[in-house]
Image (tube, rainbow, N blue to C red):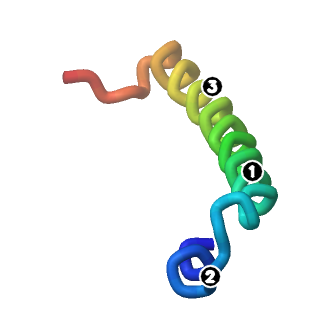
Amino acid sequence: MGKLTMGGGYSLSQILPSLMNMLLITAIMLLVGYLPFRWGFNKARRLGTLGHM
């Protein structure tokens, strides 16, 4: 998308649908990654296997 806007002569409004799709997928992937991480972190903390300073 950067290549299209900077060198391809496309305007931001022309790539906006693709940009919105990318942002939506990014938000979903962030959530999908964060939830298991938080679950594992809390489980490790409860079990006492998490290294503390």
Q: CA distance from mark 2 to mark 3?
A: 46 Å
Query: Which label number is shown at residue 9?
Result: 2
Label 2 neighbourhood size at 10 Å, few (<14), some (14-19), many (20+)? few
Q: Secondary structure at mark 2?
A: loop
Q: Label 1 neighbourhood size at 10 Å, few (<14), some (14-19), many (20+)?
A: few
Give residue 47's position: percent from left, percent from top. 51, 18
Between 29 and 10, the residue placed more toward the observer is 10
Q: Residue at x 75, y 65 (%)?
A: 14
Residue drawn at (66%, 75%) of the image:
10
| Residue 42 in which image quadrant | top right
**Along the line of sight, the residue nearer the viewer: 34 or 13:** 13
Pick whichever, 19 or 49, lies toward us: 19
Q: Is residue 39 left or right of residue 41?
A: right
State the separation of the CA atoms marked 2 and 1: 19 Å
Return the residue at label 1. 20
How far across and down, in percent of the image, does residue 52 sit? 26, 22
For the residues labelled 3 and 1, say whether their Cβ atoms are less than 8 Å apart: no
Residues under labels 3 and 1: Cα distance? 29 Å
Q: Is residue 9 left or right of residue 16?
A: left
Residue flagged by tag 3: what amino acid is it? Trp
- Please state which of the two labelled residues, at mark 3 or mark 1, is closer to the viewer: 1
Contact (CB < 8 A) between labels 2 and 1? no
Q: Which residue is mark 3?
A: 39
Residue shown at 46% from the left, 18% from the top? 45
Quadrant including the N terminus: bottom right
- Residue nearest the observer in this picture, 31 or 45: 31
